[in-house]
Amino acid sequence: MAVDLLLGLQWGDEGKGKIVDVLTQSYDIIARFQGGPNAGHTLEFDGIKHVLHTIPSGIFHPTAINLIGNGVVIDPVIFQKEIEKLEPFNIALETKLLISKKAHLILPTHRLLDAAAEQAKGKAKIGSTLKGIGPTYMDKTGRNGMRVGTLLLEDWKERYEQLKQKHLHLLDQFQQELAFDLEQAEVEFFDSIEALKKCPLVDSEHYLHQAMKAGKKILAEGAQGSLLDIDFGTYPFVTSSTTTAAGACTGLGIAPNSIGDVFGIFKAYTTRVGSGPFPTELFDADGERMGKVGNEFGATTGRARRCGWLDLVALKYSVRINGVTQLMMMKGDVLSGFPKIKVCTAYQTPEGPIDYFPYDVSPELVTPIYTELEGWSEDLTQLGSADQLPESLHAYIDFLEKELETPIKIVSVGPDRTQTIFR
């Protein structure tokens, strides 16, 4: 039985949480494979808005098992707060939410290191969420990290102390004053460990292999977006994990030949949070309108997202490196009312026009070349089927499908799970 995969194709914030929630009714297991609480997956249904950071987006469905995979990094304090917000909904987390023993833990001093490193960069800062993600992955690859399974050892607090002392030594080298109460943060950390240990801690790769053998349907859920991938993103303005399809293999312990459909999520336009190059970014009224109508503020940080026209060069790149088989277009409703809609189909460079995503997309090196299409004025938020979509939106979708050589199977016309059109 194959594992289907869902991931973002832009710089994150594409709406992955909503689509996972919509698709979960067709799956037995939802498995998150990378990232940490720097992700914010927003779900809306029954008049309630939910924001998840670590817990997979299938948690509200009564029959689905949700698994936090080995590729995820977990802040127990943030995780406990997520659990507390779920309490009114009477979800049986002791049976529905599993955590890989191989997932790594974010310590309070990881957050300190994150803040110190970002502050030291000055104007070159990358726009970190300051959640301790980068330092945690550094400890993981440096073979110093604490994993969830460490908590089952009698001497886990001694191991914690050793790693903490290493971090404090590193912090001394930064010689910076940071407003951070480590003593209080540690009290919260140790309290939250007990909440984390109430969930089943499992050998997740074995669990998934047995589930596949039993014919269970599994959906792997990614966080952030492909253009933030540590290898293939706009480095160094990227996250610290593998956000592309390859990350599902390393982040869950599944083989490449186990992957079935790859669902790629993208917005009908483009956004980016934090620093880094963004070829189609708008600094005019159109960009301001996208941000306002689309409510473009980070679910985790609250920061305003930068907005711009759809970048097909970047999107085509993401489709190819992920092997996307189906596309889902989000926030088509936000573009309602624009008389003309632009799509970047190539970049102008000093060497001439190119139609591929190059090593460096800094503004002094690439300028977007646009194709202009007719816009639509209709309110899409109340539509319920594909045949109700305006003709100019159909033409927009047809144009994208031809360029991307991949079918667009879902069009989202609002944040609620009911505002989802299947094609």
Image: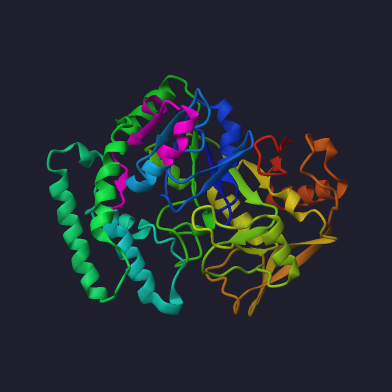
Q: Nearer the viewer, residue 14 or 86?
A: 86
Q: Which residues are magenta?
A: 82-107
Asked if the stretch drawn in magenta spans residue 206, the answer is no
Picture layout, residue 33 above or below residue 317:
above
Indicate the colouring scheme.
Answer: rainbow
91 displayed left or right of 377: left
Q: Nearer the viewer, residue 258 or 174?
A: 174
Q: Residue at x 72, y 69 (%)?
A: 369
Q: Quadrant of the C terminus?
A: top right
Asked if the stretch drawn in magenta spans residue 104, the answer is yes
Q: Nearer the viewer, residue 223 or 379?
A: 379
x, y (%) of residue 67? 41, 34
Picture layout, residue 127 above or below residue 120:
above
Q: Does any portion of residue 253 appear in the rendered image?
A: yes
238 displayed left or right of 145: right
- Farthest-out residue, top: 214
387 displayed left or right of 263: right
x, y (%) of residue 170? 22, 68
Q: How many marks?
A: 0
Quarter holding residue 390:
top right
Q: Residue at x 45, y 27 (%)?
A: 91
Quarter holding residue 278:
bottom right
Q: Residue at x 56, y 30 (%)?
A: 24
x, y (%) of residue 233? 50, 61
Q: Does any portion of residue 250 appear in the rendered image?
A: no
Quarter holding residue 151:
top left
x, y (%) of residue 402? 74, 49
Picture layout, residue 257 above or below residue 1:
below
